[in-house]
Amino acid sequence: MRRVALAVGVGVVVVVVSAIHAMGTGVTQDDFKTFLAEYEAKAIPLSRASSLAYFIASTSGADSAYERYNALELEYRRLHSDTAAFARIKAFRDGGQVTDSLLRRQLELLYLGYMGNQIAGTLLEQITALETSIEQKFNTYRADVGGRKLSDNTVDSILRASTDSRELEAVWTASKAIGGVVEADLRQLARLRNQAARSVGFADFYEMQLKLTEIEPEELERLFVELDSLTRGAFIELKAQIDSVLSVRLGIPRDQLRPWHYQNRFFQEALSVYDVNLDGFFTGKDPVAIAKAYFAGIGMPVDTILAHSDLYEKPGKYQHAYSTDIDREGDARIVCNIRPDYNWMNTLQHELGHATYSYYNDPSLPWLLRDAAHSLTTEAVALFFGSLAGNPQWLIDETGAQKADVDRVAKACAQSMRAEKLIFSRWSQVMLHFERGLYGNPEQDLNTLWWDLVEKYQLLTRPAGRNQPDWASKIHIATSPVYYHSYLMGELLAAQFAETLRQNVLGRNDPHSASFANDPRIGRFFMDTVYRPGARHPWNEMIARATGSKLSSAAFARQFVSAR
């Protein structure tokens, strides 16, 4: 996950603005240059301070750190809600005198960023305080199983490895208890976010999030309907295979399988049902050393990124993973809770994908454009690099695994990767449709909505008689709202990147043979065609320039749906 600065929860790439007074009334291109210079003088230091404060808070869990972050984030948002500055931006935009392509792009991003923040100051304060409070509750929560406090890493390990149904149910249930802690706050946050969205002319927060990130809701809906149709048959087949394996492994009939039997809290990742234990390739190994060597081998060293990062578990720390760009001038960092296993190797590679996107930007670009073209494009890069942890040839090249050992599991690796992509695509459907429903009507029976979607898209059986806010146990609903579509669209683009690299850079047609390792052309492709263009082009234009075509599901379908 990439941590993005939020403006009233809006995942807009640029969300910093300065209150600029005595700025004149002209709307010429030179006037806009003056506006930008005054804006950057105040915005950049505040952005840096807020990002650094979040890093300290999330890695320490300290109340004082969260208080400082909350104050800075509120100041950051207040500056961006300046109505006089927004009026100037609209005047520049309507005047049509800003014709330089880079200036015009900055103007458009500023317009989108400001629009979502033209709300009353008291509402802004409420939203910011509530978001920070909910996030702190998530970050410091530990599942309680019989008086034993379990970290998320421990919960995940038990869910993956245990074959005791009673233990699995107890641990899964304890992990969901955070939902009860934050449910009321999340409902209230949804109401406040909707109030903010409606105050600036949107139907609800869901619509605002999409439109302010240059995605039309109708086009997104068409894409997800297409992906539902594309993956449904293959997933039904896959789910039947998984259920057969789990039934034997757990010693229970298939019709008694419940959500806690699927080896992770949300059935969003591939399961250990194939004849391969990828964890074994990383036992006794140092994932950080592996990742460092890998990125150096493709011409994108990550030593400086890692030196600034927080990589291992500790009390009170954020339990997941994210990447953050502190200043857009080279201080890119990641937060992880690394263990020597496949999951954390994948996650480390994923977060370093985000971080290299930030670190290897084009320093000659204006600050506003020195960022990803879109959240989905940085997710695509992260997903591309993360998935290499399950690539058979990559395991040989980067972990020192013996070819004979890898050859024995190569087919299972391909099956596992395909399963991972299909499972995640179905899980993303749940998240997208749930959040659309949440913001469409926060007062409805959200528990029932959640399980209706889980049954429809993931084919899981809801626990009998359970009426708990399990939906509220997903941290992204609070911290990365209306964002999950970026992950799935990122999966499509990651497949497109892989196909482009194989065919146009490496000259290979077999979709499973390349390890994308030890070749500086890999790094050069990303730096030249993805990273350094920054946000100078709308996201689909950048994709077409990098891969030869706009985003589509074609490469994903060839690699993971049709493949067997």
Image: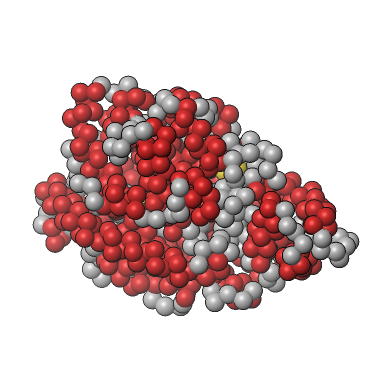
In the drawing, does residue 109 fall left or right of residue 297?
right
Task: Identify the image quadrant of residue 151.
Answer: top left
Residue 143 location in percent, x, y? Answer: 39, 51
Q: Is residue 509 visible?
A: yes
Task: Identify the image quadrant of residue 109.
Answer: bottom right
**Total numbered badges shown on the rendered structure:** 0
Q: Is residue 347 above or below residue 105?
A: above
Q: Residue at x 86, y 60 (%)?
A: 23
Which of the two residues, 266 or 227, is positioned nearer the viewer here? 227
Residue 380 location in percent, x, y? Answer: 45, 47
Residue 149 location in percent, x, y? Answer: 39, 46
Q: Residue at x 44, y 65 (%)?
A: 220
In the drawing, does residue 342 fall left or right of residue 86?
left
Q: Is residue 17 visible?
A: no
- Please name the colour scheme applied to the rendered image: secondary structure
Q: Residue at x 42, y 72 (%)?
A: 437
Q: Is residue 170 above or below residue 49?
A: below
Which of the two residues, 487 or 276, is positioned nearer the viewer here? 487
Which of the two residues, 488 or 57, is positioned nearer the viewer here? 488
Q: Residue at x 38, y 76 (%)?
A: 445
Task: Identify the image quadrant of residue 235.
Answer: bottom left
Q: Is residue 178 above or below residue 139?
A: below
Residue 511 location in percent, x, y? Answer: 30, 39
